[in-house]
Amino acid sequence: MTNTRGFTPYHNVSLVRVRIHKKAQNDIPQCPNRKVVGTGFTIVEMLLYMGLLSGFLVILTSIFLSALDVSSESQTFSRMEEDGRYILARLTYDIARSQAVTIPTTLGTPANSLQLTIGGESVIYGISGTNLTIASGSETNILNSFGSYVSGFTVVRLGNPGGKESVTVDVTLTSATQRPSGPEVRSFHMTQGVR
């Protein structure tokens, strides 16, 4: 039995099924406003992207925080160096222009204060709390900044009896900023003679 198209239905059963399937698809009404989008993310892909993004954020945050720590330590070190240089420069200037060293009184004995006579006026360096102060007349000034405090101030008188007076000064500064390994501590040393 042959039909008009030239094939027998029993020999080409699969071809008949394909034609019927295509005809059934064409009979399904299509919505004109409905767009079929072939792109999208599955929940697994979204979770994977979120996990990677959170990992990158954690790494970037740790890098940022370590950069802030390095910046803070650098500022602390600079502040301490600046305070130390200023204190030593002020001491050098005042000792060089003084006429006499009144305290410490004896040679080789350490003291926690320095008293100079400059132009007939007494100038006293000493520790007040955690600050190094200079008192001249009725005026008292703090020499270190708010970012550091003086944890040690030692003055030793040097020289020969009746000779030129000179002193050696040791100043220890400690930072007010706390690092994970502890505060920054810097020691400064100078020796200066009167004119």
Image (cartoon, rainbow, N blue to C red):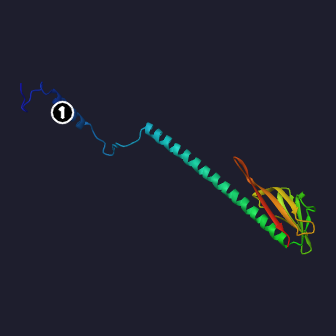
Dot 1 amino acid type: Arg
Quadrant of residue 125 within the rendered picture: bottom right
> Quadrant where the N terminus lies?
top left
State the residue at coordinates (50%, 40%): 51
Q: Residues within 10 Å of mark 1 (few under 14, many from 20)?
A: few
> Quadrant where the C terminus lies?
bottom right
- Judging depth in this view, the residue of 89 and 184 nearest the camera is 89
> Residue 16 location, x and y as percent?
16, 30
Label 1 sits on a secondary structure element that is helix
State the residue at coordinates (68%, 58%): 75
> Residue 127 location, x and y as percent?
86, 59
Q: Is residue 143 in sight in this rendering?
A: no
Quadrant of residue 191 within the rendered picture: bottom right
User: Mark 1 — residue?
Assistant: 19
> Left or right: 193 with respect to 81?
right
Quadrant of residue 135 within the rendered picture: bottom right
> Is residue 114 depicted above or below 177 in this figure?
below
> Is residue 5 depicted above or below 174 in this figure?
above
> Residue 21 location, x and y as percent?
22, 32
> Is residue 64 depicted above or below 18 in this figure?
below
> Left or right: 187 with respect to 136?
left
- Judging depth in this view, the residue of 184 and 99 nearest the camera is 99
Residue found at the very far bottom of the displayed protein: 119
**How many labels were placed on the picture?**
1
State the residue at coordinates (69%, 60%): 78
State the residue at coordinates (18%, 33%): 19
Q: Is residue 118 in sight in this rendering?
A: yes
> Left or right: 123 with respect to 145?
right
- Judging depth in this view, the residue of 29 and 89 nearest the camera is 89
> Residue 80 location, x and y as percent?
73, 59
> Is residue 19 depicted above or below 99 in this figure?
above
